[in-house]
Amino acid sequence: MVENWKEFSVSIVAAPPDTRIYAIGDIHGRLDLLKEMHRYICEDAASAEGRDIAIIYLGDYIDRGPASSQVVEYLIEEPLKCGSRHTEIKFIKGNHEDSLLRFVDREENGEAWFANGGMETLKSYGVELPSPHWQHDMKAVQKNFVSKLPKTHLAFYHNLRNYFEYGDYLFVHAGIRPNIELADQNPMDLNWIREPFLSSEVNHGKYVVHGHSINSDPDIQTSRMGIDTGAYRTGCLTCAIFESKQVRFIQT
């Protein structure tokens, strides 16, 4: 029995019938916490008799923490399996994966990424900076990084989705721009937005579950729920569990 969990009931929103959904917040290179969370999920899923399992990762697998490349390799090579029951796994793109892909495409995007935690990702891939003045040779840094980036990892980054819908829930990394239809949302907002999303009280048509914006505990509002608890610096990785109209939380 998993002991380190909290329970909170959310009214009016419901997960699909016969499905238990696990949504995992921002990992940021903390392979140790991810493995611990996977153990907790498998233990919890043992009680989901007769239900399918859906695992949704809310993005920001990389940067800031010490093991970005190792997190991605683990997710690719050791996907979470909860016994013999059907398990669906979905990966959402975070703003940090967006930054990585922008650097792969254009070297001039590197400086902004490195200032936002990308340097730790370079180190995790074994990239050595070419000189003390590497900022003036960004093309060499980009070339070195791309040469060290496994094709399977690049495919993982390219295949990330901006959002997923399950029942009355919308799972996204950062949020959505209020009063705009989902089909018309700017992908930059889905990966990066904070305001006016965080302070909005409008009904978005779906209950939005997101990461990106750090809080010490799950941030539960009438139209959204944020589950980024700053794992890379706090050691607290959060998973929200949705089943029928009940929401529970497991934390490392």
Image (cartoon, rainbow, N blue to C red):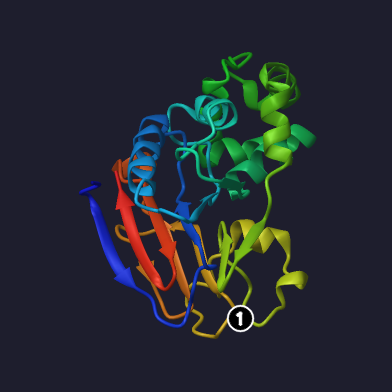
- Of residues 42 and 170, the one nearer the viewer is 42
Query: Which kind of residue does numbered mark 1 sit on?
Result: Gly
- Of residues 228 and 233, the one nearer the viewer is 228
Expressed as whole percent of the image width and height from the top left, the position of residue 10 reads 38, 76
Expressed as whole percent of the image width and height from the top left, the position of residue 207 reads 52, 74
Horizontally, residue 47 falls left or right of residue 142, namely left
Mark count:
1
Secondary structure at numbered mark 1: loop
Expressed as whole percent of the image width and height from the top left, the position of residue 58 reads 53, 52
For disc 1, the marked residue is 205
Q: Is residue 46 visible?
A: yes
Q: Residue at x 56, y 61 (%)?
A: 171
In this view, 89 is above or below 210: above
Expressed as whole percent of the image width and height from the top left, the position of residue 212 reads 49, 55
Q: Residue at x 22, y 49 (%)?
A: 4
Give the quadrant of the C terminus. top left
In this view, 206 is above or below 125: below
The residue sitting at the left extreme is: 3
Q: Quadrant of residue 153?
A: top right
The residue sitting at the bottom extreme is: 202
Horizontally, residue 93 falls left or right of residue 67, namely right
Horizontally, residue 203 falls left or right of residue 36, namely right
> Badge 1: how crowded within 10 Å, few (<14), some, or many (20+)?
few
Q: Is residue 106 visible?
A: no
In this view, 24 is above or below 105: below
Q: Residue at x 67, y 17 (%)?
A: 148
- Of residues 39 and 149, the one nearer the viewer is 39
